[in-house]
Image: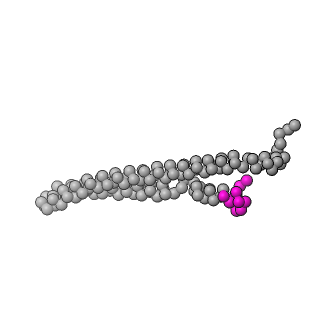
Amino acid sequence: MAAPTDKDRSLFTLVGDVPAQVQALVQAEIAHIKAELAYKAKHFGIGAGLMVAAAFVAIFLLGTLIATGILALSLVLPAWAAALIVSGILLLVIAVLVGIGIVMFKRGAEPPGDDASDSVKKDIDAIKGVGDYER
């Protein structure tokens, strides 16, 4: 006798398959949530690292600006002009690091694909038999 097809399966067989399918669904949802959290943590971590780097460079900017003020008061044009140029370069580095950090924070706040909560809602709708879902 040939193996029963989906149409030939009894109600008891179908009901018996439900726990395994629910378990597989829950495991898939957990894996999806883990992947989404890992993606967000990665980008938040990179963004935080860049912000720390910008703060570190800002400390040097503060020292340079203080040196610029001291040298400007001494009215030695070449010395304070050089210090001001170094301050401008450090300020540019800080601006670039902060800009990249902001982009990484925004990227970390976005889901990599489908949002896990939307996927769970679709699964619940499919179990209830309402809404649009794929079979």
The image quadrant of residue 84 is: bottom left
Give the residue displayed 58% in from the left and 55% down from the top: 116
Residue 40 or residue 97, whichever sits in front: 40
Residue 133 or residue 46, whichever sits in front: 133
Asked whether the viewer can see residue 81, the reply is: no
Residue 55 or residue 19, whichever sits in front: 19
Give the x, y percent position of residue 39. 50, 50
Q: Name above or below for residue 1 compared with residue 46.
A: above
Residue 18 or residue 131, whichever sits in front: 18
Q: What's the coloring here?
A: one colour
Quarter of the figure with the N terminus: top right
Q: Is residue 44 left or right of residue 54?
A: right
Q: Is residue 38 left or right of residue 15?
A: left
Give the residue displayed 13% in from the left and 58% down from the top: 76
Asked whether the viewer can see residue 58, the reply is: yes
Give the residue displayed 70% in from the left and 57% down from the top: 127
Residue lying at the far right of the rendered structure? 1
Q: Is residue 68 left or right of residue 12?
A: left
Residue lying at the far top of the rendered structure? 1
Q: Is residue 33 left or right of residue 7?
A: left
* Numbered disc total: 0
Give the residue displayed 46% in from the left and 58% down from the top: 106
Give the x, y percent position of residue 64. 22, 55
Which range of residues does the magenta coloring cover? Answer: 124-135
Q: Is residue 129 magenta?
A: yes
Give the x, y percent position of residue 129. 73, 60
Give the x, y percent position of residue 30. 58, 49
